[in-house]
Each structure stands twice: as structure tokens, then as C-alpha cells.
Amino acid sequence: MGLQKQLLESAWDWLKDSLADLDGDVVLTSPYLTFEVCNRLAQTAHATSVSWLLATSLDPSAVANGYLSVQGLRRMLDSGFEVRHVERLHAKCFVLGSRGMLGSANLTGAGLGSSAGANRELGVELDPAQAEQARAVILAWPARVIGHRDLDELLEESRRLTRTSVRGQEHELDAASALKLAEELLADARDPQRSLWLKLEYGEPGLDGWRQESWIASPKKGKPGFRPGDLVIICAKATYDCYAVVEVISDPEFQPQDYAEWAAGYTPDALARWPWINRTAPRLVPSTLMELKLEELGIRGQGLQNGHVSLKFDQFTAGVRALARLASN
């Protein structure tokens, strides 16, 4: 095979082909991982009889900044992966049976090129002898096998990192402001006094309404658990697009006058069906709809019968990081 054929601009295409024609044990190294990639690999691993090993680095700051999915690592453990923590890991190498690839791409949608807003990456395919040599090197690294308790500790440590003061979105986003707002949000999310949520809103995505103070409505089953300071990712029920992040700025209110007046012009039974509201302020609202789907955060629509769900810290940070990355492209 010539050198030109060995150079790979899309790691995802190579990875899909190698998974479809798997002829031996799998060894992967990647410091960063996103849930959707972990989930796809876990599904494949569960359906095979070969062994699967992932070498990564349990870095709390990577979790806090949305680069490392704890829920994705849990999914891999549950599917039979052996997961190892390797100090100072930077290598990105994928060995699947007799095939191997070495390059710059992490096991993330942006790195592999499987999601919108892909990075510009480059890799090289290894021949069978080189793949086997890479496998031997990786397996010889000093490492610690990790389990669910290690992931619990990682998640808690990531939340203890220093937080900064609260800020809000005051303008349309460009590349610089999107990343700045994301960093502020990720810092605030580390505050143990804040809860992190995903809220399902009926209908199509509506960006304009979230660029100003608004509200989230809850059903009549009981007083909702949202509290001032909580951070909420907004998701459209009609399309499952996750498209904005807001901060709760009030305790729950039952049928306040301004909401009642709005509901009267919206739909006759809205006030009765969703009588509780919490007022919100914008924190990260892109200028246009981003391509971030509910399943990329590890959530399924059927788990949202009450219209909202509590998010794990890494799920929230992954969503914020994805929105900021897409908004800055």
C-alpha cells in the first residue's frame, strides 16, 4: 500500500470499516471521549467475543470542561471493556485485530469526524506488524484498571474545581463569545449548590424566546424541583434538538398573572396543564439552531415523561461544550 493510501483524514470512516471486519482483540487509547462514541463502541463490544481494552486518563478538568464523558466510560465498563487509567496519556491509537491507526483524533465526535463541527485531523494506517507492535507498547504502559467507584470519585472531584462568578449572555454569539460563555457555564456547573437539568419544551426549537428572560413550565403533578441558580439545557420535543442553556432565577410560582395572560393567548388548557413556572435568564443561546441531539447526551426521549430530567455533571458539560463548539464554527 502506498503512503497516499495510508494517510487518513477521517478516522471515523476507518474505524467503521475496521469494526465491521473485526478479526481480533481491540486496544484503544484516547485521553478524551464523548458519550455517543463510547456508546457506539460499547454496543459493538457487547455483540462480539473478542476482548476490548481502553486506555485513557481520569482527568477531572477534562470532565469539568466537557472533554471526557463519565457516563460514556460507565457504558463501556458495562459492555465488557477493560478500562485503564494511564498517567500523562496523550496518544491516540486504535488497534482492531490486525488493523491499526495512529493519529491526532480522540474518540470524540469532533475528533473522529462523526458529528457536526468536525476537527481537522490526520492519521496514518499501520500495517499488521506495526499494529501488533503498537498493541505491545500500549499493554506495557504502567496503568491502573478502573471501575465504577473510580468514576464516582472522578465525577465528584471534577465538581469540586474552583467556580467563578455568575454571568449571562448579553449579545449574539461569535466564536470568541461562545467559548467565553461556555467557560463561565462550565465553571458555574461545578458549584455543588446548583442542580443541572435538561428540560423538554413542546413544539419546534424556538431560539428567540430564550434570548431574554423567560420561564420554564412544569405540570400540575406537584411543585417542581427547579431552584434559583440551577442550569438547564433546553430541548425541543418535536425534534429532540438541544439548543440553548438557561439559568433558573426564581423559585417555582403557581399560575402568576403574566404567565396566565400569556397562556390564555397560547392554548386554552396550558395554564391548567402546566401551572407552575420558574423564571429563567439566558446563559448560552446560539444565533442559529445547532446540530446537537438528545441521544448525544446519553438520554432517551422515553425517560422524559415529566418533561425534565436531572443531568450528570459530565452530561451537562458535554452538552455545553458541543453547543459552544458548533456555535464557533
Image (cartoon, rainbow, N blue to C red):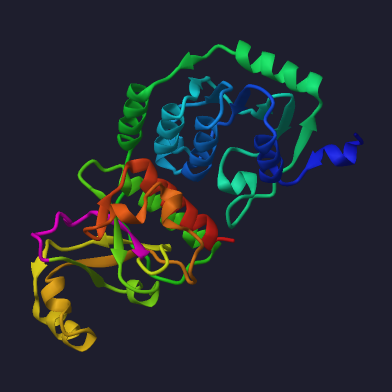
Is residue 112 shown left or right of residue 254?
Answer: right
Residue 226, magenta (yes or no): yes
Picture quadrant where residue 17 is located: top right
- The x and y percentages for residue 87 are 52, 20
- The x and y percentages for residue 223 are 9, 59
At horizontal 55% and vertical 60% (from top left) the residue drawn is: 328
Is residue 271 shown left or right of residue 313?
Answer: left
Asked whether residue 183 appears in the rendered view, the answer is yes
Picture quadrant where residue 52 is located: top right
At horizontal 37% and vertical 52% (from top left) the residue drawn is: 300
- Quarter of the image with the C terminus is bottom right
Does 89 appear above or below 13?
A: above
Asked whether residue 104 appears in the rendered view, the answer is no
- Which residue in the rendered view is the most extreme toward the right? 2
At horizontal 62% and vertical 25% (from top left) the residue drawn is: 26
- Quarter of the image with the N terminus is top right
Does 287 appear above or below 95?
A: below
- The x and y percentages for residue 243 are 42, 64
As rendered, which of 195 and 310 lies closer to the eye? 310
Secondary structure mostly seen in magenta is: loop
At horizontal 13% and vertical 77% (from top left) the residue drawn is: 271
Residue segment shown in magenta? 220-236
Residue 260, magenta (yes or no): no
- The x and y percentages for residue 272 are 11, 75
